[in-house]
Image (cartoon, rainbow, N blue to C red):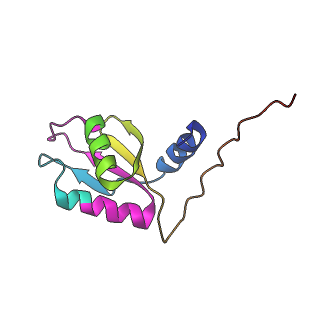
Amino acid sequence: MTTKQRAYLKGLAMTIDPIYQIGKSALTPELTQGVSEALEARELIKIHVLKNCMEDPKEMAQVLAERTHSEVVQVIGKKIVLYRESKDKKKIELPAEKKSKSKEL
C-alpha cells in the first residue's frame, strides 16, 4: 500500500464509527472471525480498544491484520483502522499507484 493510498483510507476512516470493541478478553477467535466478515462487507473498519484491555493496540492491530489478511491503515491511541479489499463487494477505489519514471537515453 502506498502512502497516498494510506492517506486516502485515513480520510475515509475519519467519518466512520467503530463497529467492534476489544475488551479484557483481547483477541478471541470469534472476534477475529467477526472482523474478517466485517472487512469483506465493508472493506474499511474501525475498532475501539477498551480501557480494560491490557494489550498494546499496535501489537493487536498487527496480529489482527495477519489473522484477517488485511492491512493496518492506522492506530491512533485506542482506535485501530483496518482495510482489506473485498472479493465480491468492492466499494472503495484506491488512488492508482504511480509508475516509476524511466529516463530514456
Q: Which quadrant holds residue 74?
A: top left
Total marks shown come to 0
Question: Magenta segment: does it hold 25?
Answer: no
Q: Please report the residue visible at 53 percent of the width from the left and 66 percent of the height from the top.
A: 90
Relative placement, left or right, of 95 versus 10 is right
Position in image of residue 75 (x %, y %): 37, 38
Q: Please report the residue visible at 55 percent of the width from the left and 59 percent of the height from the top.
A: 92
Relative placement, left or right, of 43 versus 53 is right
Position in image of residue 11 (x %, y %): 54, 45
Position in image of residue 15 (x %, y %): 48, 51
Relative placement, left or right, of 87 versus 94 is left
Name the quadrant of the C terminus.
top right
Position in image of residue 64 (x %, y %): 29, 48
Q: What stretch is highlighted in magenta?
A: 33-57
Relative placement, left or right, of 3 versus 67 is right
Q: Which quadrant holds residue 17?
A: bottom left
Query: Vertical placement of 90 versus 68: above or below?
Result: below
Q: Which residue lies furthest to the left in this view?
A: 25
Query: Vertical placement of 87 versus 8: above or below?
Result: below
Question: Magenta segment: does it hold 47?
Answer: yes
Q: Residue furthest front?
A: 105
Q: Please report the residue visible at 19 percent of the width from the left and 50 percent of the height from the top.
A: 27
Q: Which residue lies furthest to the bottom in this view?
A: 88
Viewer-nearest residue: 101 or 77:
101
Query: Vertical placement of 19 versus 51: above or below?
Result: below
